[in-house]
Image (cartoon, helix red, strand yellow):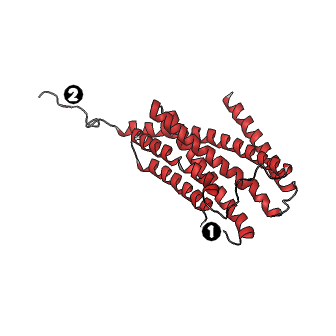
Amino acid sequence: MTIVRNRWLEIVTVAIIGVSLFRSMTVVADVTQGDVQRIMYVHVPSAWLAFLAFMVTMVGSAAWLRTKDQRWDRLAASSAEIGVVFTGLAIVAGMIWAKPVWGQFWTWEPRLVTTALLFFIYLGYLALRRAVIDPVQRARRAAIMGIVAAVQIPIVYYSVNWWRSLHQPSSARSIDTPLRITLLLGVVAFTFAYAVLLRRRLELARLEEELDAKRFEQSQSVAGADITAPSLASHPHD
C-alpha cells in the first residue's frame, strides 16, 4: 500500500512539473525583461524551497534534542541535503538571469552574498555529519548547528530590505496575474518535488543506518573467539 501511495505521489509530481514547465514557456513574456524573465519560474521556487528545507532541518534538529529519536535526526539530515541542492539551483538560475539583465553573472551585493553564505553553511553542516562517527554525538552536534544555521534564512530573505541592493525586492504581489499564477504553480511543483525527494532520502537514510548497525555488530568480535578449547580426544592416554 505504501509503494502505491509513493508511486501516485511521484506520478502527480511529474504531472505538475510538466504543467508548470509548459506554462512557464507559453505564458506571456514580461514587458520589461522579456523572455529572460522566465528563468524566475525556476529561480524563485528554488529559493523558497531551500528556505522550506532548511526550516525542516531546524525543526528536526530541535525535535531530536528534545526526544533523542533518531527519526528526527534523519529528517533533519535528509532535508538539509535537499536544501543544499535547491540553494545551488537558485544560485545558478539567478546567475543565468543576471548576465543579460545586469551584464555579469555575479556581483557582490547583499542578496547574492548572503545566499552563497547560506549554501556554504549547510555544506558545512553536511560535512560535520560525515566527520563524526558516533551517531549520538553526530546527531547532537548536527542538531545544534542545524538550529543556529537557520538564523541565516531571515538574513537572506530580508537582505534586500535591510541593505541598499542591486537585487530587486520581492514583487510577487505586484506582477501581472498570468505571471503570478505561473510563479505560484512553479512553487507548488517544486514543493511536490521536495516531498518526493525527502521521502526517498528518508528511506535511504534508514537503510544506511541499518547497514551501519550490522557492520558494527559484525566488527564486535569477542577477543579469542577464534581460539578453540583443547579437546581431550586429541590427547589420548598412553
- Looking at the image, which residue sits at the far bottom? 103
Q: Residue 66 versus residue 207: which sits nearer the camera?
A: 66
Mark 2 residue element: helix
Q: Is residue 14 visible?
A: yes
Reading the image, the residue beneath label 1 is 107
Q: From the viewer's perspective, is residue 32 above or below residue 209?
A: below
Characterize the local packing of mark 2: few (<14), some (14-19) or many (20 or more) Cα atoms within 10 angstroms: few
Describe residue 182's horizontal placement relative to residue 115 as left or right. Answer: right
Expressed as whole percent of the image width and height from the top left, the position of residue 14 reads 76, 44
Q: Quadrant of the N terminus?
A: top right
Q: Quadrant of the C terminus?
A: top left
Give amino acid for label 1.
Thr
Mark 1 residue element: loop
Q: Is residue 88 visible?
A: no
Characterize the local packing of mark 1: few (<14), some (14-19) or many (20 or more) Cα atoms within 10 angstroms: some
Reading the image, the residue beneath label 2 is 233
Describe residue 234's horizontal placement relative to residue 73 as left or right. Answer: left
Q: Residue at x 48, y 35 (%)?
A: 64
Query: What is the spatial separation of the Cα atoms under label 2 and label 1, in whole angstroms?
Result: 84 Å
Give amino acid for label 2.
Ala
